[in-house]
Image (cartoon, rainbow, N blue to C red):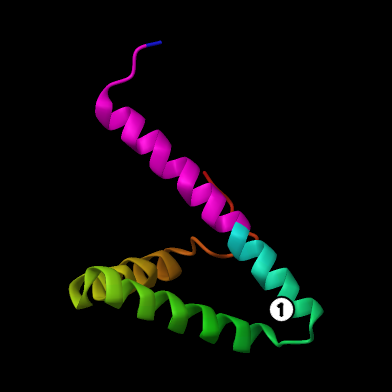
């Protein structure tokens, strides 16, 4: 099975994203079990993520992420009952 370098990079990025999602799910579950409301957890997660992104990559990257997330929200990508066609 031969993979190009870009395919391998894509696979590695996908694996890292899956690991990051698992960490976030664990942190979310811990917060909920401690009685922290979902809205507070979400705001704290966004604030922390944007602070770290601004620190590491700058304002353009943070604004780009916000634009991407806005488009995904409008498209319904985060809806729990989303139907893929």
Q: Is residue 14 above or below residue 23?
A: above
Q: Is residue 15 above or below residue 65?
A: above
SS for dot 1: helix
Which residue is most to the front?
A: 55
- Residue 85 in picture, x, y percent from top left: 52, 44
Tell me which corner region of the image, top left, top right, bottom left or bottom right, holds residue 31: bottom right
Q: Is residue 63 magenta?
A: no
Instruction: Judge the density around disc 1: few (<14), some (14-19), many (≥20) Cα neighbours within 10 Å.
Output: some
- Residue 27 in picture, x, y percent from top left: 66, 69
Can residue 82 be seen here? The reply is no
57 vs 24, left or right, is: left
What residue is pinned by disc 1? 31
Q: Is residue 82 above or below residue 63?
A: above
Q: Is residue 85 above or below residue 56?
A: above
Q: Is residue 5 magenta?
A: yes
- The residue that appears at 81% across and 77% down in the rendered structure is 33
Tell me which corner region of the image, top left, top right, bottom left or bottom right, holds residue 69: bottom left
Stretch of the chain drawn in magenta: 2-22
- Residue 22 in picture, x, y percent from top left: 62, 55
How many numbered badges does the structure rendering display? Answer: 1
- The residue that appears at 67% across and 72% down in the rendered structure is 28
Q: Main secondary structure of the magenta part?
A: helix
- The residue that appears at 43% across and 74% down in the rendered structure is 49
- The residue that appears at 59% across and 64% down in the rendered structure is 24
Can residue 64 be seen here? The reply is yes
- Residue 53 in picture, x, y percent from top left: 33, 72
């Amino acid at each position: 099975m031969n993979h190009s370098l870009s395919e391998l990079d894509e696979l590695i990025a996908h694996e890292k994203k899956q690991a990051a999602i698992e960490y976030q799910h664990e942190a979310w579950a811990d917060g909920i079990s401690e009685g922290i409301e979902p809205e507070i957890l979400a705001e704290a997660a966004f604030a922390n993520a944007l602070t770290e992104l601004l620190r590491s990559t700058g304002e353009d990257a943070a604004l780009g992420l916000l634009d991407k997330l806005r488009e995904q929200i409008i498209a319904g990508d985060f809806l729990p009952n989303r139907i893929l066609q």
